[in-house]
Every structure is written in structure tokens, then in C-alpha cells.
Image (cartoon, coloured by chain):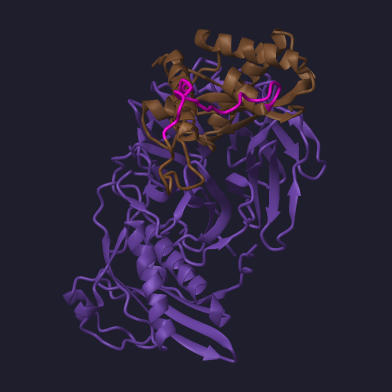
Amino acid sequence: MTHAPVRTRVHARVRTRNPMAALLFALLSAITLIAVLAQPARAEIEVNVNRGDVQPLPVAIPAFGGGQVGADISQVISANLQRSGLFRPLDPASFVEKGLTANVQPRFADWKTINAQALVNGQVTVEGGKLRVDFRLWDVFAEQQLLGLQFTASPESWRKVAHKISDAVYERLTGEKGYFDTRVVFVAESGSRLNPVKRLAIMDQDGANPSYLTSGDSIVMTPRFSSNSQEVTYMSLRPDSSTIYILNLETARRESLGTFPGMVFAPRFSPDGGKVVFSVERAGNSDLYVMNLSSRSSTRLTTDPAIDTSGSFSPDGTRIVFNSDRSGSPQLYVMGADGSGARRISSGGGRYTTPVWSPTGEFIAFTKQTGGEFHIGVMRPDGSDERLLTSSYLDEGPTWAPNGRVLMFSRETPGGASKLWSVDVTGRILQPMPYPGAGSDPAWSPLLN
Amino acid sequence: MVRSFTGSAALRLALVATAAASLAACQSKPKPAYPTTPSQPTAPPSTPLPPQAGPVTGQPTAPLPGSAQDFIVNVGDRVYFDTDQHEIREDARPLLSAQADWLKRYPSVVVKIEGNADERGTREYNLALGARRANSVRDFLVAQGVAAGRISTISFGKEQPIDAGSGEDAWQKNRNAHTAIVSGAR
């Protein structure tokens, strides 16, 4: 078994900040269902994450000074921002000012010429075996520095530094937290359809640093992160039994949730990480249970003779959305975290499964089957404002980026391998994940430290 | 979407018969162990030859009664379900009744019912659906007098298809419950 690389720590401190350039905003009137924060706009650059038809913001990201690692860091930042769909990194060949370091003011006219709205430049230095990365974010047309930060890290953590800079730029320009310094746990698939090998795997959100967490001797599925990103709960299926495990990514220690009379599946952590909601099957009937991980006591939440599965907590931990076919077909229901007051929320026709509450609480993502197609969609927790974001032969199992703006899921073509894809909540930015292998059941981590 | 199971059962039996026939054909083919051309002509017989014996055909021996092979070939180890359903279909009842009879005849046999679903559903829901199918078969066998303690169940959801294709034919095959012999067979 290959163990995942140990997380490394990156320190950052704000070096300068221009108070005049405080531009948390989102002013364009909402054409989507997403709530818009009405904020005054005082600067020229605006990136509105809420609009589906927004033109991506042209941004210049020249290679950071300091040799190859500087160039590599710029490249990772550029790829991150491009993939978000909100930014359009400009071709470095078009840059007029060359060799810009982090210690001088850019020649803004040179960047206006190529219509760069924002500029990210930086410098890498190695000091006492440590990597020091200084970077600045500029509003080209306002001729203002929007952000200046310095990161120190061990040299092998250069990608992590690049992700942190990407998050800082994203947050400064959109007013929303980023999601680049995150990881994805998923099921790496190999073998044939009739003889599949499924291994738990983990990688950075941009597909880098993939490594296996299990050997493939049993089928694994549906991994989910805990809120501290240190633990993953997943299900293992053997010829005679199923087990829910909790795997500590730092220590590689794995423990079972325990032995139950029937199958156990569909585990998911509570937001505080103290509980796991899961399904227990007995005599063919699947019900939702919740286990308190410190006391190890479990409580049954549903008693319906229908299928009850795929429980997912609201971010405040007070409610659970789940999947039940008590009405005759699979639909979505919301109940109290104690199992009280279950109420159906899906009403659009079709079969609804795999509900997942968004980290911000405002949406529930789901898989929907209708008209022979599968869709990833979102609706509000009361079932209103349903919107389908994707459509294909088989799309399944959405997971939210920690800022609630992007969903990852698995997509299969007829007879083809399962691949990881992402789509933003507007449905505009749909793309395959930069991971070349076959994979399914992705789960996005919270922002890392 | 309802597809008749009898069609596929008949097809399967036909395939078994074809396999047996082709095996028989192979075995009946004479395979001389020495040169058949005599080195010297023999003297003509003074008496007429005895009438030639009829052709000899070979075929595999029948499975040993009470063996897993006997169960698979002579009873059938898999029944099929309609989309998103777990009720035992009418056309599956004779096969399951035969499974129950066989299990009562060989009371030391322990079985595991594996419930399966097609790929036209999501992973977790399909695990639950497969569990229902496995349990439907178990209930049927128990109702026919097989001791409940001899039957365990598991669901593989959509993880263990028997047909790799993508289309109604493949999906129909993959919506099944498989009765696997765990122990006690000859």
C-alpha cells in the first residue's frame, strides 16, 4: 500500500494591503437562482461568480522570478484560475514588460496594452533550505496593488504554495473563498467491467500527486472527507460482507464502524466530524442510522419499510437530506438530524438520488434520472429552484468544492470507463478533471491548512 | 420495460445443449493411436465380415447429483428482475421452486443469495435495491420450506455485472439474484 504524502504546512503573512481597493462585491443582478450579495463596487476589476454568462477576466501571470520553480508556480496558478472558468490567463508571449520582479511597480501601460485586467507577479527565493515566495496582485487599470503576500514552505511544497496563491487571488477578486488548496479522495478504477479493481485514491484538486490508499483486494466505494480533512470514511465490499471504515490519512490507521446484522453502506460524516450517518440493511430493508464516534453508540433514524439511504447533513448539523423510495420511486427528503419530521423536497418528476448538502447550506446537489439520461442538479433545501447542470448517459454522485461554487462527479459513456468531471453551479463551466485515469465517487476535501 | 425471462432461460439451456453436443462431437471423432494404413495387404477373409457396429457417440457425464454443477445445470442459479423492482416475477417462480426442492433434497447445502442491479441507477441506491432482490429470493425459498439459517444474503449493487454491455439486453441480465452455493454440496 502506498501511503499518501504527509501534508506540509505553509506559512503566509499579509505584507501590504491597499484599503482603497476593498472590493468585495457581486453587483451584477442575479440572472441565476443564486443569491447575490449586494456590495458597492469601488474598483475596476470585478469577477462575479454568480453569473453564468460572465466573460472570464483577462489576467497576466508572468513566470515568477527565481528559476524553474518560479515558472512552475506561475503555471500552476494559471491552470487553477483558468479551470475555474472565471479567469482567462493571457499568453506570456504577448507580454510587453519582461522580467518584472515582485519588488518594483509594474509598468501599468505595458499591461493595459494587452488588456490585462489583473496582474500576478512574484519572486521565489531559497533561504536556509526554505522556499520563500513573495507575490503581488495588481489592478492594472486602477494602477493599484490589491494584495501582497509572502509564503514560506519547504521546497517540496511548492505546488501547495501555488494553490494558496491561487486561493488568495480568487478570494481577492471574487469575494469568495477559493478551493485550490484542496484534495480529492476518489475510487481509482482498473480491470475490466466484469472484473473491476477499485482502489481508494487521493490527489490534489488539479490531479497532481495521485496515490493509492488501499490495495484493491476488495471493492471500495463512496469515500467522504471529514471536516478536518484528516479522515475519510468509505465502504468496502467483500464477497460475503460490507464494512464501513474510517481511515486516518495522517497515521494510515483504519478502523471499522463495527459489525451489523446486514449490509452497511453510504457513510458520511457530520459537519463537526463527531458522527457518521450511514445505511444499515436488514432483511432487505435499508434504514438510516447515525453513530456517535466517541461513544460508539448508534441510533436508528428511519423505520420506513422503503429504501432510506445517502444521508447528508446540513452544514449546521441540524438536518439531514436523504434518498428514499417511500413514495414509490427514489426521491429526496429532509428531516431533523434526530430523524424527526421527514418531508419530501423533490417534485420535478424523475428519479432523484445521492443528495449532498452544499457547504454554504444554500443548495442540495443530486443525481437525477429522467428521459433515459442522468443529470447532476441543484435545488434549494426546500426543493425550490431546481436546476439541472449536466446531462449524459451516466452522471452520478456530485461532491461540492468547499466554497460551494463547483461540483465534481463521475461520468460514464456506454461501455466506457468512468471519468471525473466538474461543473460550476451555473452549469456553464463543464470540464473533465485533469486526472487521466478512470475514477468514480469523488469527494472534495475542505480547504487545507 | 418488461422482458420475458423465459426467452433467456431457453437460450441458456440451448447453449448448454449446444456445448454438450459440440463436446460430444469432439469426443466421437476417431483418433487413431497407430498408422491406419496396413503395411501389407491382408489376405481376403474367407468368411464374410460381421456386420459393422453402429457409430459410438460420447457425451459428458451428467453432473453428480447434489453437486454445485448439478444445481447450476439442472436447476438454475439465477433469476431476473424488472427495472427498479424486487418482486419475484411469475416466470422466475418455477426456477426458485426447483431451487427450494433441490435445497430440501440436499439439506447440508448452505447458500448465499447475491442481489445485483443494472448500471441505470446510482451506487448507493443500487446497493439497497440489490439487497431487496436478494431478500425476495431468500423469502421465497424460506416460504417453500428451506431453513432460513441456511441462507445468507448480500448485495453487490451494480458492482458485479455479468454482462459488460450497455443496452437493455445487458441491463436485464444484470438485474438478478444469484444463488451461490457456499458449502455442503458434493
Residue furthest out toward the front = B46
Identified at 63% across, 45% down, the residue is A234
Looking at the image, which is closer to me, A149 or A371?
A371
Question: Is B32 placed left or right of B64 in the picture?
Answer: left
Looking at the image, is A53 positioned above or below residue B83? below
Q: Position of residue A443 (x, y in %)?
A: 53, 49
Q: Quadrant of residue B163?
A: top left
Looking at the image, is B161 positioned above or below residue A307? below
Q: Quadrant of residue B171?
A: top left
Q: Is residue B47 magenta?
A: yes
First to last magenta residue range? B44-67
The picture's colour for chain B is brown
The picture's colour for chain A is purple
Q: Image quadrant for the N terminus of chain B?
A: top left
Looking at the image, which is closer to me, A113 or B106?
B106
Q: Is residue A40 magenta?
A: no
Looking at the image, which is closer to me, B153 or A302?
B153
Q: Position of residue A214 (x, y in %)?
A: 63, 55
Identified at 61% across, 69% down, the residue is A5
Identified at 59% across, 47% down, the residue is A223
Per the picture, the main secondary structure of the magenta-coloured stretch is loop
Identified at 35% across, 35% down, the residue is A388
Residue furthest out toward the left = A113
